[in-house]
Image (cartoon, rainbow, N blue to C red):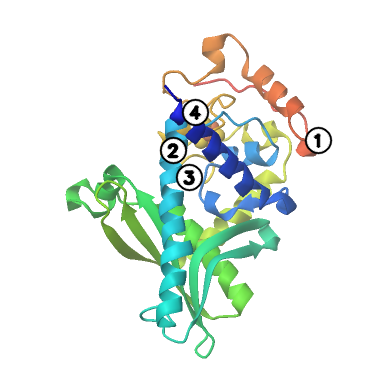
Amino acid sequence: MIDIEKVYHWYIKTQNEANREKYEEYDGWLSASSAGQCHRKQWYKTYKYDERPIERDSARKMRLGTVVHEDILEKAIPTYLTMHGSLPGVENWTVYIEDRIELPDVKVVGHLDLVSINPDSGAAILSDFKTVHSYKWRKMFGHIKNRDKNPSINYELQLGTYALGVKRKYDVDTVEMNIVWYNKDTSTMRTTRIQKAYQTEALNYWTNLKETIEEEDYDKVYKFKALVPGTWNSPVNEWECNYCQFNHICDSPFITKKGVSNAKSKGTSLEDKRRASADKGSTSSGGGSLPKAQKSK
Ligand code: SF4
């Protein structure tokens, strides 16, 4: 029997590495798509701590989103533009696909999906595509009593970040922000408008994060900070810790998933794990003291 799963996993890994190479010149910058993530996670990433290898099924789930993106952005939209000259609703506007956005003051870079610019009115319309499973879909569009109050704050901050970049890059005054949702289970599509306030929220997030990222000493940044889900210092939701690529070196009390290589279960101290990770990492992890283990609550 041919191990096709192995072949596909190799392919996904190769594609992900190629994608990372696009950002090689941005060493030390943060990715716009990580907007809203736990500060600790961002800190570990910046100082190049070892990331836990992604599981095969998780990698495939993410790849499915990329495939839908590629179909819409690299095939459907360019073909439509060739055949019709412009997109519906924004006739004679200039369209940019997978456009690079930079915010050098907070060292953030990313690629938005689609932006349409009206050079006459100084307006822009931003569209970002998100693929989700039915569970998340129900949290957003299901029965009102089952809806999450804030199911997609990370995405909203990501859009707010792109909007800030669009304003600077194209000198436009207003940016309408939309998320185009695609349900991977039912193929239903729906578009939601994002409030303008997320542009300010995004700037606040990156500005606060920059302050903590610039502190290389882990203890100074985190020792006295409690993890309170939903605040900038912590994951938005407790369950995120179970899927975090740094949960093998983080002492978050919210790591409950079986099989996570947790320091306590292996009899190795968190300090040792972090030290090993930092030693293996880039020399840019800097002159700050090595993070020390924190006590789990
Ligand atoms: S495990 Fe949780 S608290 Fe720790 S870095 Fe990851 S998301 Fe943040």
Res 32 quadrant in image: bottom right
| CA separation in Å, label 4 and label 3 | 39 Å
- Residue at 42 percent across and 58 percent down: it is 71
In primary-sequence order, the first of circles 4 and 3 is 4
Q: Are marks 2 and 3 in contact (CB under 8 Å)?
A: no
| CA separation in Å, label 2 and label 3 | 30 Å
Residue placed farthest to the front in the image?
1
Q: Position of residue 78 (x, y in %)?
A: 47, 70
Q: Which residue is mark 3?
A: 231
- How many numbered callouts? 4
| CA separation in Å, label 3 and label 1 | 31 Å
Q: Nearer the viewer, mark 1 or mark 2?
A: 2
Q: Does residue 113 appear to the left or right of 25 in the view shown?
A: left
Q: Position of residue 141 (x, y in %)?
A: 24, 54
Q: Does residue 34 appear to the left or right of 243 in the view shown?
A: right
| CA separation in Å, label 1 and label 2 | 32 Å
Q: Amino acid at mark 2?
A: Arg
Q: Nearer the viewer, mark 2 or mark 3?
A: 2
Q: Position of residue 261 (x, y in %)?
A: 53, 19
